[in-house]
Every structure is written in C-alpha cells, then in structure tokens.
Amino acid sequence: MNCVSRLSTTVNIIVGSHVWVDDPNKAWIDGQVIKITGQEAEIETPDLKKVVSKLLNVYPKDTEAPAGGVDHMTKLSYLHEPGVLQNLRIRYELNEIYNYTGNILIAINPFQKLTHLYDGHMKEEYKGASFRELSPHVFAVANAFYRAMIKEGKSNSILVSGESGTGKTKTTTMLMQYLAYLGGRNSESY
C-alpha cells in the first residue's frame, strides 16, 4: 500500500488510481497509475503517454465529479490545485465565470461580453436573495454587502483583487452599478 500524506490527509494511491500529475506544458494532466515502484508512480495519460512521477507529486482525481463542475469549491472531493484548476476550466468553458470558495467569489475574465449575466432580469433575480441561494455571481456579493450595510447596520467591505488584465475594473463597475440599482429601488421590498 502506498499512502501519501498531505496536510494531515492520507491518500491511498494504488495501481489503477485515477490521478493528476504535474506537466511542464499544461500545468496538470490526468491519467491512471499503471505501476508503482518505491516512491514513484508510472502514469498512463489519455493520449497513451507514460509519465513517471514521485508519489508526493501525484494527486487523486475525482472520477465522479459532475461534468459541468461545481459552483462551490467546497463541493470538490479533493481540494487541491489540479482539482480546483480543472473545475475552474470546466466552468469557464461553459461561460460560468463565477465560483465560490467559502465566502470568496472567484471570477475568471471571460475575455468576451456576457451581457446576459448583468441584465435587468439578473439584477431582479439576485435582489433580496440570500448569499449562496443562487449561483455564484458578483450581484450575490453586492447583495450580501448591501444587506449587511443597510439592513443590518454592520460595517462591511468588498475586496476586488487580481493580476493585471483579469477584469478588476469591470467587476468593480458591476458592483457599483448593482449597489446603485439596489439603493435607487424601493428598499422596503428588499
């Protein structure tokens, strides 16, 4: 038996395990363990290439993950880098650019206009909804902020962070427009 311990979690990697292994060109590739020798695993990738890696650099793959990914990272069976990146990639390909991890909203710049995400229908849908009641969205964060500040009288803040070109300005614009929309509407129906 070959057990790999990571942050007090023991993972059993055996021949036949579906895994992620680091790749210099693609960051992570998936495959199946076909041989284990000492502390190294030989992995066969879907394109039938063989990769040898130290067991410490091999991560289990969730073969039962939903085809469309999950909207909240805590729903992942394995919360590790390749699992998180795979989930974000899957959802990005479906134009699902928002994901939660705890109380944090992860937004991926779609590099295209997704106007349906910000139209009046979406504004009304998120208005008054509890945090996480609906799919992850920048409006859900703004709504929680508005509720805490206006309805509950609590101090609150929103941090928009990311690298250059990731959409911080656009996200901040959407937040401000939605907060103005909430503040300009009849807040009693909130």
Image (cartoon, rainbow, N blue to C red):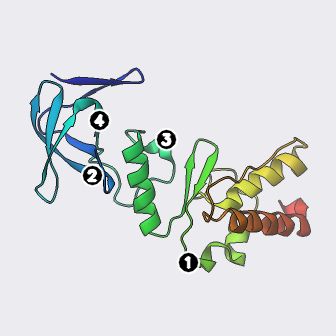
Place residue 98 in its image quadrant: bottom right
Place residue 181 in its image quadrant: bottom right
The amino acid sitting under disc 1 is Gln
Q: Nearer the viewer, mark 1 or mark 3?
A: 1
Q: Residue at x 54, y 70 (%)?
A: 110
Residue 151: mark: none
Q: Secondary structure at mark 1?
A: loop
Q: Residue at x 42, y 24 (%)?
A: 7
Q: Nearer the viewer, residue 102 or 168?
A: 168
The amino acid sitting under disc 4 is Asn
Residue 112: mark: 1
Q: Residues within 10 Å of mark 4 (few under 14, many from 20)?
A: few
Q: CA distance from mark 2 to mark 4?
A: 12 Å
Q: Secondary structure at mark 2?
A: strand
**Quadrant for the N terminus in the image:** top left
Q: Residue at x 38, y 46 (%)?
A: 83
Residue 57: mark: 4
Left or right of 178 on screen, residue 54 = left
- Per the image, the residue denoted by label 3 is 74
The amino acid sitting under disc 2 is Ile
Q: Residues within 10 Å of mark 2 (few under 14, many from 20)?
A: some
Q: CA distance from mark 3 to mark 4?
A: 22 Å
Along the polypeptide, which appears first: circle 1 or circle 3? 3
Q: Secondary structure at mark 3?
A: helix
Along the polypeptide, which appears first: circle 4 or circle 1? 4
Residue 115 horizontal/vertical position (percent): 63, 79
In the rendered image of this protein, does residue 178 appear above or below residue 3?
Answer: below
Q: Secondary structure at mark 4?
A: helix
- Per the image, the residue denoted by label 2 is 29
Along the polypeptide, which appears first: circle 3 or circle 2? 2
Q: Residue at x 69, y 64 (%)?
A: 171
